[in-house]
Amino acid sequence: MSDLKKYVERNAKSIRLSNGRTLGNVLTDESQRLKSIIEKYITLHYNSHTPEHYERTYGLINSLRVDNVKQNGNTISARIYFDRGNATNPSLTNHAGQPHTSRLFGF
């Protein structure tokens, strides 16, 4: 295995780009930016109507999470997800207790 490949597998998050930032920093920032975009569209949905038959809990928007950047070999990743424990509401679950909340938005 080449020395470069070994280095990348050990240090992918720390590789510096020409602007001085690391790949890990860039992925962290982009993950947060994607989270903000998702929040924007959830807010647009919330603002598109006033609920008449339920009280809004804001569980969906408050359940959006971003994990820290992780490295596995020469791959770095970040996970953006809905924390189902916070995203669900008893009125939005089926008989098996599975959440429907995120399905409203096609996720």
Image (spheres, rainbow, N blue to C red):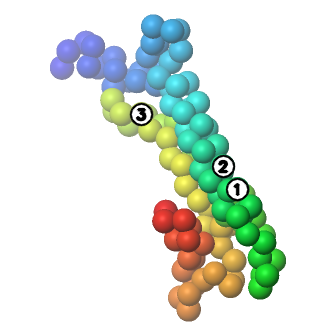
In the picture of the structure, the residue carrying the numbered disc 2 is: 40
Q: Is residue 89 left or right of residue 102?
A: right
In the picture of the structure, the residue carrying the numbered disc 3 is: 76
**Callout 3 touching callout 1 (CB < 8 Å):** no
* 75 vs 21: above or below: below
Residue 16, percent from left and from top:
46, 13
Q: Residue at x 18, y 20 (%)?
A: 1
* Residue 32 seen in render: yes
* 96 vs 30: above or below: below
Cα–Cα gap, marks 2 and 3: 26 Å
Q: Nearer the viewer, residue 79 or 61?
A: 61
Say which element carries label 1: helix
- Name the residue type under label 2: Lys
In the picture of the structure, the residue carrying the numbered disc 1 is: 43
Give the quadrant of residue 46: bottom right
Give the quadrant of residue 75: top left
Q: Residue at x 55, y 38 (%)?
A: 31
Residue 67, percent from left and from top:
57, 44
